Image (cartoon, helix red, strand yellow):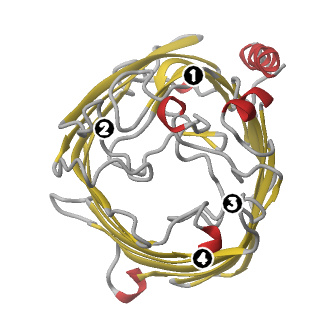
Amino acid sequence: MLNKRISLIALGMLSATQAMANDQAESKGFVEDSSLKVLLRNAYINRDFKDGNPDKSEWGQAAIGTFSSGFTQGTVGVGVDAFGLYALNLERSEDRSGAQGIDFFKKGDSGQPADDLSKGGAAIKFRLSSTTLTYGDQMPALPVLNYDNSRLLPESYTGTLITSREIKGLQLDAGRFTAESRKSAEGRDSGGLKSINVLGGSYQFTEQFKAALYASDVEDVLKKQYVNANYVFPIDKDQSLTLDFNGYRTKLEDSYVRENGITGDDNKIWSLAATFITGPHSFTLAHQRSTGDSNLGYPYGGYQKDQGRVGDGGNTIYLANSFWSDFNAEDERSWQVGYGLDFSTFGVPGLSYNVAYVRGDNITTSTSEGGTEREIFNQIKYVVQSGPAKDLSVKLRSSVLRVSQKSSEYNVSGNEVRVFVDYPINIF
């Protein structure tokens, strides 16, 4: 079983004696290596849905405080991580809130979204050599369990995570989490997660080549495997070609399939992206393909308590064609053409622009086959480079998504606008 494997690997990590690296030996102390940061975020998302669906939007102001201590000196270092989150609802519209894809403020039993949210968490951490064990509330960033920080407040999880970097270029992760805090609700267990085990690692084989392999097991829901291979071909001083392959395989539990009226239980989805960079320009071509018999396509994200979804957060989709639509329907094939521009070369450092066109076809639903969808994505971002507002960023993003009638059971057409203003402040 996966949890037994995690226990064995964790024991091996912690008992490593011939480490090639030793981060703990470089520890300066609990206070000396500590940091306190505050992120002020103003976020707005508007979705102008088509085909008679009601429009949705949410707007909020958040303050995200994070504290990370250093480790005490000695063979085994001890430290603490903590966070405090607060969000104020600036729109407070019963009619316009409640879209799963926005999810700033969860609606209560009365149908009204919350006026504000506040929550916090803390974790204790131990470090032996270059292996760290963290227990408590944390925000894991793994391809099979990646906390969602793309909305107003981030998600968090409660559990144990061991990360080992004893060998140069090699990272191993093993963990078990038993609660999920939804990004739009208070409380440690607002996401409805029973438990999830995660296991895997990544290795930097050469300066150009890196690969990763991970697996997860969401209790009573699904098992998932992930593979990644990334290769960078240096061409010239300011030119390179990057090939990036990502793939997931998922298998839903039989009981979950029966209880939720799902057709089929397995899915395989992969993407291959090629990005050519020359000076300030980047050009991307990508293909993504979903196969299997599950009518969910690639199942990820959402919250089990009130959405009938997988329950492993909202961001575990390391795939090339994930924008507003994730192009992850049953049998879907999608192609992307993208372009990016860094304005630093033209005298405006901190300014960047990205555009992409993605088209998906061959979509299967319970009533049709051969459905299509297409999206035009635009994003412009500016990061202040100096002065009192240094590192403040403004991000404007828009998507135009059109879904064929055959695919209406899977997705819905609309125009989306996102405006995010992030101001990170380093207290110490």
Name the N-terminal-most of marks 4 and 3. Answer: 3
Q: Position of residue 91 (x, y in %)?
A: 17, 52
Residue 169: image quadrant is top right
Name the N-terminal-most of marks 1 and 4. Answer: 1
Q: Gap in Å between the C-alphas at discs 4 and 2?
A: 30 Å
User: Pointer 1: what residue?
Assistant: 24
Q: Gap in Å between the C-alphas at discs 3 and 1?
A: 46 Å
User: Pointer 3: what residue?
Assistant: 329
State the mark number for residue 404.
Answer: 4
Q: Gap in Å between the C-alphas at discs 4 and 3?
A: 13 Å
Q: Which mark is in front, 1 or 4?
A: 4
Q: Position of residue 239 (x, y in %)?
A: 65, 82
Badge 1 amino acid: Gln
Q: Gap in Å between the C-alphas at discs 1 and 4?
A: 56 Å
Give the position of the C terminus as an image quadrant: top left
- Give SS at disc 3: loop
The answer to whether marks 4 and 2 mark residues whose Cβ atoms lie closer than 8 Å is no
- Give SS at disc 4: loop
